[in-house]
Amino acid sequence: LSSYLPQLFSSFAWLIFASEEHCDKAFEVISKQSVNGKQLTVDFCGVKSKHPPKQTDRNQQPINPLELYVSGFPASTSKDQIKVLFRSATSVTFPPAAKAKNKLFCFVKFDNVKDARAAFEKGKMLKIGGAPVDVLYARLKKGRCWC
């Protein structure tokens, strides 16, 4: 079992289990727990969730094979730290809106598909400051081409 609190004063946490079987057993126990007199709300991620994510137009957009979306890192993470992790990147961008809303994500661009793919694969096991990080391909904006 490992846990992840996205921010210091979060009202939620992710619990990551070694197997689905362990998760199912823990779900039964944790669902009955309370903290400071408040019943915990416990849910699965993905298809087992009581509130599965809705498909949006954005999710229907094609991916940009030269750009990655990186999220879930600690607030103290700098652009230089991201550059060290993705050495073949040509640029790292923290959108101004992301900082303003305290959403922790950035975009990492590459010169070629091979480097982007290698970084994407590396991202599957990547941790920053001990926290697991999400590394996904960025989506193309409507009417734009990556070529």
Image (cartoon, rainbow, N blue to C red):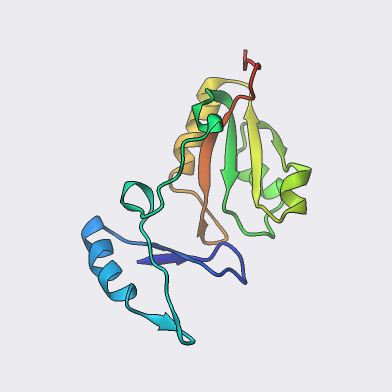
> Vertically, is 143 above or below 110?
above
Q: Is residue 70 left or right of residue 20?
A: right
Foreground pick, 126 / 65: 65
Query: How many labels, in total?
Result: 0
Q: Position of residue 46 (x, y in %)?
A: 37, 48
Instruction: Identify which residue is drawn at 75% across, 51% down.
Output: 99
Quadrant of the image containing the C terminus: top right
Quadrant of the image containing the N terminus: bottom left
Q: Residue lying at the far bottom in this picture: please name it.
A: 37
Instruction: Identify which residue is drawn at 44% across, 66% down.
Output: 3
Foreground pick, 40 / 130: 40
Instruction: Identify which residue is drawn at 46% across, 41% down.
Output: 54
Q: Position of residue 143 (x, y in %)?
A: 65, 16
> Vertically, is 67 above or below 79?
above
Instruction: Identify which residue is drawn at 28% across, 62% down.
Output: 23
Q: Is residue 79 left or right of residue 65?
A: right
Q: Position of residue 70 (x, y in %)?
A: 58, 43
Q: Position of residue 136 (x, y in %)?
A: 51, 37
Foreground pick, 145 / 38: 38
